[in-house]
C-alpha cells in the first residue's frame, strides 16, 4: 500500500523518534480491517521505535477499523477510525513523530492556552480523504491531545461510517463534534478553532502579556505577500515577527496554479510548503494560528493577539489578504455545511453523482465547475453579469464539458432547503425578468473575495470596498504602518503581484527605519 519512495522518506523521518510509539488496532470483523492491518504493519516495520499491536478495546475505540497511538504505555488521546490514506497519511506520520518527541511546532502562547483547558473534551473530526483542509484540522487536534491529557481527538473517515454521517446530517468536511455535539463544520482553520474554544471557555482569554523584545517589523498575514515581506525584511538584518492565521493563506486551498512565472504547474499545497521552507531559512519569529485583535500606536506600534500576547514593533506591514465573499441571500448562512459550500475540493465528494450549482463566472467559479465535473452528475454555473469573467482558456474547457451548463444574467434570490438540506436555488433572469427555481443538492459560492481589514476600520483609511488605501510604495494613512497584497486597493489579485507588493512593502519599511533612525 505504500510505495518504496514513501517508505524511504518515512524511514528517514522516523529516525527522529526519541520514544517508542505503539499503534494499537481494535480487534473484530470489518471488510476493510485486513487492509488497515497490513497498512499499519508496513508503517511499523519502518522503525524499531514503532510497534503494531492488536487488542480488544471496545470501551475506547468505535470499530475494528479504529486504532490509537500509545506512548510510555499510556494512550496519547489520538485515534484514527479508517485508513488514513490520501491527505491524511501525513496526519498519521506527524502524529507518530510528535508522540515520539518531535517538536509540535506550535507557538508557546497557543500551547499555554490549550494546557489551561480544565474539562474533558472529546473531539470527533469527520473527514474526506480527498479534502485538503481536513489534515490541518486533524493535525491541530492531535497536537492539542498531546499538550493536554483531558483532550482526545479522533479522525473519522466519513466514507467508512455512512450511517453516522446520515444520522448526524453531515454534508461537509471537516465536521467537528465536541462531546457528541456539533462544534464547527465546513471550511475551518486552526485560528477559528481557537476562537471557538475561547468563546465556549472564557477563562482561556488571557490577560495581555507584553513580549519584551521590540521588533523592527511586525508582519500581519502569512500568504504570499506576508512571506515575501518577511523574507525581504529578514534579509536586511531586521528583527521580524510574523503573525498568521495560517501559512499560505488562500493559496494553501488552491488546487492548481499555472501562472507562476518559471513554474509551469504547481499546487497550493506545494507552493505553501515551498514558501514555509524559504521562510524558515531566516530568523523570523512566526506566530501561526493567531489573529490580531487590536493595534494601537504610542512610541511603538502595539499589536494584541487573540492569545493575549502583545508585540511592540517600530513598523507594521499588514498583508491579511481576503476571504470568500458571500451572496448575502436568504438560505445561505442557514445552510452552510448542509449544502452551501465555499470550497469545492472539500465538499465536492459529498455530492458525488448529484446535480449542483456554482455561483460565479470568474476564474474561481469556472475552475470550481471544472473540478466538480469529474465528481458530480451536472453543474449549472450562474453568473450575475451578461458574460463570464473567467480567462478564455478556462471558459473553453468548461463549454466543452457535457455536464456543465452556463447561465448568465442570473441574479440569485434564495437558497431553499427542506429539513436542513439544500433542495434548490431561486434565481431571476435579469433580461427576461423571469424567476426560476433550479433543483440542486448543493450551491458552491465562488463570487470573489472580501478584504480581511475589519479590525483596522478605526486605525487605517479604507476605501468603500474595505481595502486598505496605499500609495505606490505601500504606505498607508498612518506613519510606520504599511500594507500589501489582496487586502489593499492595488488592482489584480494575483499571487505574483502579492509577492512583489510584499517585497516592496518590506523595502519601504526598511527605508522608513533608516530615515527615522529607528534602527538600534
Image (tube, helix red, strand yellow):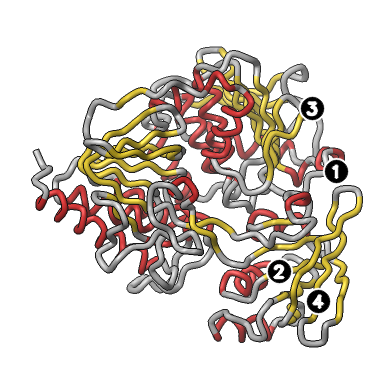
Check disc 1: other Cα within 10 Å, few if <14, some if 14-19, many if 20+: few
Check disc 3: other Cα within 10 Å, few if <14, some if 14-19, many if 20+: some
Residue at coordinates 42% horizontally, 30% vertically from top-left? 104
User: Which residue is the site of mark 2?
Assistant: 358
Residue at disc 1, secondary structure: helix
Rendering quarter of residue 56: top right
Q: Tell us which disc is closer to us: 3 or 2.
A: 2
Check disc 2: other Cα within 10 Å, few if <14, some if 14-19, many if 20+: many
Residue at coordinates 49% horizontally, 58% vertically from top-left? 451
| Residue 210 percent location from the top left of the image | 31, 25
Q: Name above or below for residue 86 compared with residue 489.
A: above
User: Which numbered disc covers residue 28?
Assistant: 3
Check whether the beta carbons of the residues at disc 3 and disc 2 lie within 8 A of each other.
Answer: no
Q: Which comes before the other along the chain, label 4 or label 1? A: 1
Q: Which comes before the other along the chain, label 1 or label 3? A: 3
Q: Is residue 17 visible?
A: no
Q: Horizontal placement of 467 versus 397: left or right?
A: left
Q: CA distance from mark 4 to mark 1?
A: 33 Å
Q: CA distance from mark 4 to mark 2?
A: 15 Å
Residue at disc 2, secondary structure: strand
Q: Which comes before the other along the chain, label 4 or label 2? A: 2
| Residue 264 percent location from the top left of the image | 40, 73
Q: Tell us which disc is closer to us: 4 or 1.
A: 4
Q: Horizontal placement of 68 versus 279: left or right?
A: right
Q: Tell us which disc is closer to us: 3 or 4.
A: 4
User: Which residue is the site of mark 4?
Assistant: 428
User: Which residue is the site of mark 1?
Assistant: 166
Residue at disc 4, secondary structure: strand
Q: CA distance from mark 3 to mark 4?
A: 55 Å
Amino acid at each position: 500500500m505504500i510505495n518504496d519512495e514513501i517508505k524511504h522518506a518515512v524511514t528517514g523521518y522516523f529516525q527522529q523518534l526519541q520514544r517508542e510509539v505503539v499503534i494499537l488496532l481494535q480487534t473484530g470483523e470489518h471488510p476493510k480491517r485486513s487492509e488497515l492491518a497490513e497498512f499499519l504493519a508496513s508503517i511499523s516495520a519502518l522503525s524499531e521505535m514503532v510497534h503494531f499491536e492488536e487488542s480488544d478495546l471496545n470501551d475506547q475505540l468505535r470499530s475494528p477499523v479504529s486504532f490509537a497511538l500509545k506512548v510510555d504505555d499510556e494512550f496519547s488521546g489520538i485515534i484514527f477510525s479508517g485508513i488514513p490514506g490520501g491527505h491524511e497519511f501525513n496526519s498519521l506520520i506527524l502524529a507518530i513523530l510528535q508522540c515520539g518527541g518531535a517538536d509540535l511546532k506550535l507557538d508557546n502562547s497557543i500551547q499555554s492556552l490549550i494546557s489551561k483547558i480544565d474539562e474533558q473534551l472529546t473531539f470527533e473530526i469527520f473527514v474526506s480523504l480527498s479534502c485538503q483542509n481536513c489534515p490541518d484540522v486533524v493535525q491541530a487536534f492531535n497536537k492539542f491531545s498531546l499538550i493536554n491529557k483531558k483532550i482526545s481527538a479522533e479522525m473519522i473517515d466519513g466514507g467508512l461510517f455512512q450511517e453516522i454521517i446520515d444520522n448526524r446530517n453531515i454534508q461537509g468536511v471537516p465536521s467537528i463534534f465536541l462531546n457528541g455535539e456539533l462544534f464547527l463544520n465546513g471550511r475551518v482553520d486552526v485560528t477559528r478553532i481557537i476562537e471557538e474554544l475561547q468563546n465556549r471557555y472564557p477563562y482561556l482569554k488571557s490577560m495581555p502579556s507584553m513580549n519584551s523584545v521590540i521588533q523592527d517589523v511586525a508582519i500581519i498575514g502569512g500568504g504570499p505577500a506576508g512571506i515575501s515581506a518577511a523574507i525581504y525584511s529578514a534579509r536586511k538584518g531586521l528583527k521580524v515577527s510574523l503573525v498568521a492565521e495560517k501559512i499560505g493563506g488562500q493559496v494553501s486551498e488552491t488546487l492548481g496554479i499555472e501562472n507562476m512565472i518559471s513554474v509551469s504547474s504547481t499546487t497550493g499545497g506545494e507552493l505553501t510548503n515551498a514558501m514555509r521552507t524559504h521562510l524558515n531559512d531566516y530568523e523570523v519569529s512566526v506566530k501561526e494560528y493567531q489573529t490580531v485583535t487590536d493595534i494601537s500606536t504610542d512610541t511603538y506600534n502595539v499589536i494584541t493577539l487573540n492569545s493575549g500576547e502583545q508585540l511592540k514593533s517600530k513598523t507594521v506591514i499588514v498583508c491579511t489578504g481576503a476571504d470568500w465573499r458571500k451572496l448575502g441571500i436568504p438560505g445561505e448562512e442557514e445552510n452552510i455545511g448542509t449544502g452551501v459550500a465555499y470550497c469545492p475540493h472539500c465538499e465536492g465528494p459529498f455530492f458525488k453523482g448529484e446535480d449542483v450549482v456554482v455561483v460565479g463566472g470568474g476564474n474561481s467559479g469556472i475552475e470550481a465547475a471544472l473540478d466538480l465535473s469529474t465528481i458530480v452528475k451536472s453543474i449549472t454555473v450562474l453568473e450575475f453579469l451578461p458574460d463570464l469573467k473567467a480567462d478564455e482558456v478556462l471558459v473553453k474547457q468548461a463549454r466543452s464539458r457535457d455536464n456543465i451548463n452556463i447561465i448568465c444574467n442570473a441574479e440569485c434570490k434564495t437558497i431553499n432547503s427542506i429539513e436542513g438540506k439544500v433542495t434548490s436555488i431561486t434565481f431571476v433572469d435579469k433580461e427576461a425578468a423571469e424567476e426560476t427555481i433550479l433543483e440542486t443538492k448543493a450551491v458552491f459560492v465562488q463570487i470573489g473575495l472580501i478584504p480581511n481589514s475589519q479590525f483596522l476600520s478605526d486605525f487605517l483609511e479604507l476605501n468603500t470596498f474595505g481595502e486598505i488605501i496605499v500609495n505606490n510604495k505601500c504606505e498607508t494613512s498612518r506613519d510606520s504602518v504599511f500594507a500589501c497584497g489582496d487586502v489593499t486597493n492595488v488592482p489584480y489579485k494575483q499571487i505574483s503581484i502579492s509577492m512583489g507588493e510584499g517585497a516592496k512593502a518590506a523595502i519601504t519599511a526598511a527605508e522608513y527605519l533608516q530615515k527615522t533612525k529607528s534602527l538600534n
